[in-house]
Image (cartoon, helix red, strand yellow):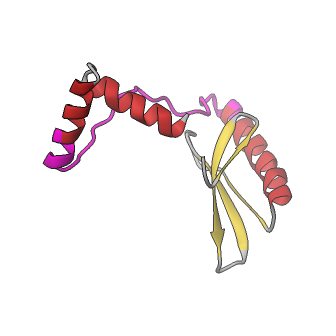
Amino acid sequence: MRNTMEINGYKAVIQFDPDIDMFRGEYIGLNGGADFYARDVAGLRKEGEASLKVFLEMCEEDGVEPRKWYSGRFNLRISPELHASAAAAAAAEGKSLNQWIAGALATILL
């Protein structure tokens, strides 16, 4: 995935902040915020490990599960035309709309 970094099994989104001339990493899928800054990839990894360590220690102290829980369900709002096209594509493959979209997302993301 583009603009992401995985550190110790946790993913972070990486963006460049031109105001401070540094890269910013922000962990995703956590039950709280954990971010880090550096000027290069090696620095991002080092700072990311330190930020994650502090976050995980705080979660343990507070008895909080560090990772967010996802139900596997979400609502998607699209145009009626796109909905019709997706339903037709799913039917052509003998799949439900849900199966077809899940497969398309898996192809793109995994």
The percent coordinates of residue 108 (x first, y second) are 49, 40
Q: Residue at left 75%, top 37%?
A: 57
| The stretch drawn in magenta includes residue 109 | no
The answer to which image quadrant residue 54 occupies is top right
The percent coordinates of residue 62 (x first, y second) are 64, 33
Q: Residue at left 70%, top 30%?
A: 60
The percent coordinates of residue 47 (x first, y second) are 80, 54
The percent coordinates of residue 3 (x first, y second) are 62, 55
Extreme residue in the top direction? 94
Which of 36/99 is in front?
A: 99
**Can you say which quadrant of the picture contains the C terminus?**
top right
The answer to which image quadrant residue 7 occupies is top right
Relative vertical location of residue 58 with respect to residue 51 in this rendering, above or below? above
Which of 29/86 is in front?
A: 86
Left or right: 70, with 24 as reference point? left
Relative vertical location of residue 85 with respect to residue 94 in this rendering, above or below? below
Q: Which residues are magenta?
A: 60-84
Extreme residue in the front direction? 92
Q: Main secondary structure of the magenta part?
A: loop
Q: Residue at left 72%, top 77%?
A: 21
Left or right: 85, with 23 as reference point? left
Which of 61/11 is in front?
A: 11
Relative vertical location of residue 90 with respect to residue 49 in this rendering, above or below? above
Q: Tag count in the figure?
A: 0
Which of 51/98 is in front?
A: 98
Left or right: 87, with 31 as reference point? left
| The stretch drawn in magenta includes residue 78 | yes
